[in-house]
Image: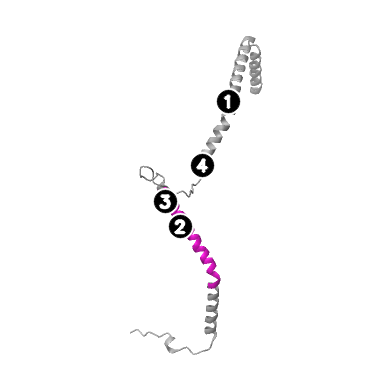
Amino acid sequence: MALNSKQKSLETHIDNRRAEPELDSEEDLEELESDVKKMAEKILEYRSTIPDQLKATLASVLSSQRPSFSDIVSEPGSSGELHPDSEETELEQRTKEKIQLLKEKISSNISSTPAILNRMKSCISRIEELSSGNGVIHPAFKKRKVVRQ
């Protein structure tokens, strides 16, 4: 029964809307049309300006996140003072030198690996010959027993 009363109240509410005078609806319609025109103007304005704003914003974000590895060393200015970024460029230059030195060390280690491997193999074979041999070990090389008192 509660559902029937809700349906009846809804139907009467809809019927009341239909009974409104037409003058109000025409005024509302004109107001809505003017709002639509204003929104259309805003949309056209946004369509013309937003792409340029997005492009500029994206460019600034990308440039701020891009690391600057310039090969240009800062020179003293006309007043004899160093540029404000001189500390950063010196730090970058040191970092570049350290990276280059590290690369050179790694490449020299890699190039010397075959020679080291051959030496290791020869030493291992000599150790195996000595350990497999039944030769007599000189007493000087034997471990002495320490007597504690």
Magenta stretch, main secondary structure class = helix
Q: Secondary structure at mark 2?
A: helix
Q: Amino acid at mark 4?
A: Ser
Q: Nearer the viewer's eye, disc 2 or disc 3?
A: 3
The verdict on residue 97 being magenta is: yes
CB contact under 8 Å: marks 1 and 3: no
Residue lying at 55% horizontally and 80% vertically, measured from the top left: 125
Residue 113 among magenta residues = yes
- Rounded to the nearest angstrom, the CA distance separating label 1 from label 4 is 28 Å
Which colouring convention does the figure follow? one colour
Q: Quickly name the residue at label 4.
A: 63
Q: CA distance from mark 1 to mark 2?
A: 53 Å
Residues packed near mark 2 inside 10 Å, few (<14), some (14 to 19) or many (20 plus): few
Amino acid under disc 2:
Lys
Q: Amino acid at mark 1?
A: Glu
Q: Position of residue 134 (x, y in %)?
A: 53, 89
Helix or strand or loop: what does disc 1 sit on?
A: helix
Left or right of 142 in this view: 47:
right
Q: Earlier in the sequence, mark 1 or mark 4?
A: 1
Q: Is residue 139 above or below residue 107?
A: below
Give the mark nearer the N terminus: 2 vs 3: 3
Crowd tier of the residue under label 4, counting other residues whose Cα lies within 10 Å: few below 14, some 14–19, many 20 or above: few
Residue type at mark 3 is: Glu
Q: Which residue is mark 1?
A: 45
Query: Which labelled disc corresponds to residue 66?
Result: none
Q: Which residue is nearer to you in this view: 88 or 15?
A: 88
Magenta-highlighted residues = 87-115
Q: Mark 2 and mark 3: span between their CA atoms?
A: 12 Å
Nearest to N terminus: mark 1 or mark 2: 1
Query: In the rendered image, which residue does mark 3 sit on?
Result: 90
**Residue drawn 54% across the image and 32% down it:** 53
Circle 2 residue: 98
